Amino acid sequence: MENMKFENLDLSREIKQAIADMGFEEPSPIQAQAIPHILAGKDIIGQAQTGTGKTAAFGIPVLDMVNEKDSSVQAVILCPTRELAIQVAGELGKLAKYKKNVRTLPVYGGQPIDRQIKALKKGVQIVIGTPGRVMDHMNRNTLKLGNVKMMVLDEADEMLDMGFREDIETILQELPEKRQTTFFSATMPKAILNLTKKYQKNPELVKVVRKALTVPNIEQFYIETKSKNKSDVLSRLIDIYNPKLSVIFCNTKRKVDELVSELQSRGYFADALHGDLKQSQRDNVMGKFRNGTIEILVATDVAARGIDVDDVECVFNYDVPQDDEYYVHRIGRTGRAGRAGRAFSFVSGKKEIYKLRDIQKYTKANMKRHDIPSLSDVEEIKTGVFLEKVKNVIEEGHLTNQVNFLEKLMEEYTSLDIAAALLKMSMGDQNKEEIKEDLFEDTGAESGMVRLFINIGRKQNIRPKDILGAIAGETGIPGKLIGTIDIYDGYTFVEVPREHANDVLAVMKNNTIKGKTINIEPANKK
Ligand code: ADP
Ligand code: MG
């Protein structure tokens, strides 16, 4: 692993402060390698798998390189979809928190163009957009590219897959000759190499290679859950498996701190281990963990590198790790010295599912799906543990005083009723709600609507009326209730009213459109 620090990079105070606020502990490998080249003005091709922090790898240097005093467009970032444009704009917005004079603007189809034109007129240094909408603004002359010094193609492989090559070339040709061009991509197909030959100058290939890894032989599970339910799910797993010691990994220092407060307020003996702690504080935390005063250690990857405690029974990946190597290091904290261990990875959203699948494929890890434990699972197990304790107390004896008190109560109630009441009182409030997993949250649709993904598109000659006809025809929902239909090369998004979403999914799943069997699922904003 790289040991580069953000401190060692030649970045402004404002950016460093924003990075610290975001809780990033150290640059990811692609960031450590790409940022210095970009700051030095070089053209680069950045290749690293998904989820490795490519956005900040270009976002950080771009933000530091634009001239705040000049309000013309100086950087253009192209992204394949509106979701990604919004996401990249969001990440840049956070990184630009202390750069009050840098303005960024996402431009994408589906949003009224007038609003974007107005914003562009006010002066924007960094435009983040989909190729189609960027071209649209170029044609209307509402986006002037004469001062552009930097061009970023994010998720370049995906853009080419979606058929944007011509648009991208048109945009690149409109840009000033003297500019920096960077490509970021998870894969490097030939089509990208052709583009780089044509439009980049002596590009540096910055590639984060995967190392061969051996996954320790421990039981590995993954659990699909919404982000907001993660801490509930975590508590249930801890209650059920009742590990003597466990380590929970989060991707940022901030998450570590948040989770520790949450666990402590729920009564768990948990504490944090991350890079903001002084050496003496870390030693203190580790000491307590070793002797069991702390049962749950919540840590970042960096801080946990040296953890060598033998009886860690469970590792939880509260966030999916940023790369394969982290995964292997993390789960290697358990199952040490020949003991049994379990690792649980939480995934929320499609992007994380894909990332975990990728890790699984590459590390050849065998991960089994684990259901979210239900309340009755937790109750049954907790009660079992409690009754075991009751048995021990009975066997130890010395209960004369208590027996005397109970005899009075026995004149009115049976011993079984009394025992049941005592059990209820000591097990606490069991009337908590089941964890609700809403399939249709965050699909990025208009309110009242749900956005669905269908795996066929333009390449299969699909037109809006085919989608409309199929859904209306098969489900009986009036066509006029069906909302926006966005058709891309390989897939389609369609919005349907929320109350009909379940029916549409049930009826359309594995059904055919234009003779092709389709897959349909809720779209994911992430
Ligand atoms: P990619 O574009 O490579 O798929 P992203 O840029 O979307 O990955 O980053 C994935 C996640 O990792 C984001 O939530 C981002 O905020 C987070 N992230 C990026 N850099 C770091 C870092 N140095 N430390 C911790 N988290 C990071
Ligand atoms: Mg990305």
Image (spheres, rainbow, N blue to C red):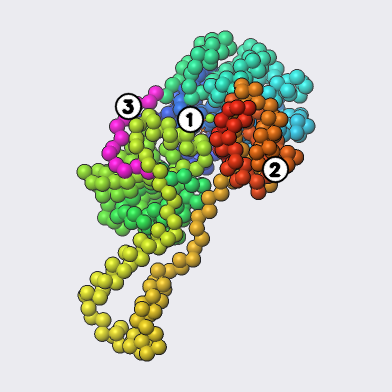
* Numbered disc 1: secondary structure: loop
Quadrant that contains the C terminus? top right
Q: Mark 2 or mark 3: which comes first in sequence? A: 3
Residue name at image x 37 percent, y 37 percent: 327
Of badges 1 and 2, the one in the foreground is 2
> Marks 3 and 1, how far apart in space?
18 Å
Horizontal and vertical percent position of residue 417: 39, 79
Q: Is residue 471 magenta?
A: no
Q: Is mark 1 within 8 Å of ligand 1?
A: yes
The residue that mark 2 highlights is 477
Q: How far separated are the C-alphas under marks 1 and 2?
A: 38 Å
Q: Residue at x 39, y 85 (%)?
A: 413
Residue underneath mark 1: 50
CA–CA distance in space, label 2 to label 3 = 52 Å
Where does the magenta region start and end? Answer: 209-221
Query: As shown in the figure, which amino acid type bears the numbered disc 2?
Result: Ile
Q: Label 3: which residue? A: 212
Q: Is residue 489 above or below residue 305?
A: above
Q: Can you see residue 205?
A: yes
Foreground disc of the pair 2, 3: 2
Q: Amino acid at mark 3?
A: Ala
Examine the rendered structure and indicate whether residue 243 appears above or below residue 152. below
Q: Relative to the observer, which residue lies in front, 52 or 121?
A: 52
Q: Is tag 1's residue or tag 2's residue first in the polypeptide sequence?
A: 1
Q: Residues within 10 Å of mark 2 (few under 14, many from 20)?
A: some
* Residue type, numbered disc 1: Thr
Q: Classify mark 1: residues with Cα within 10 Å, few (<14), some (14-19) or many (20+).
A: some
Quarter occupied by residue 451: top right
Mark 2 Cβ and ligand 1 under 8 Å apart:
no
From what the image shows, is residue 178 above or below residue 257? above
Where residue 63 sits: x, y (%)? Answer: 59, 29
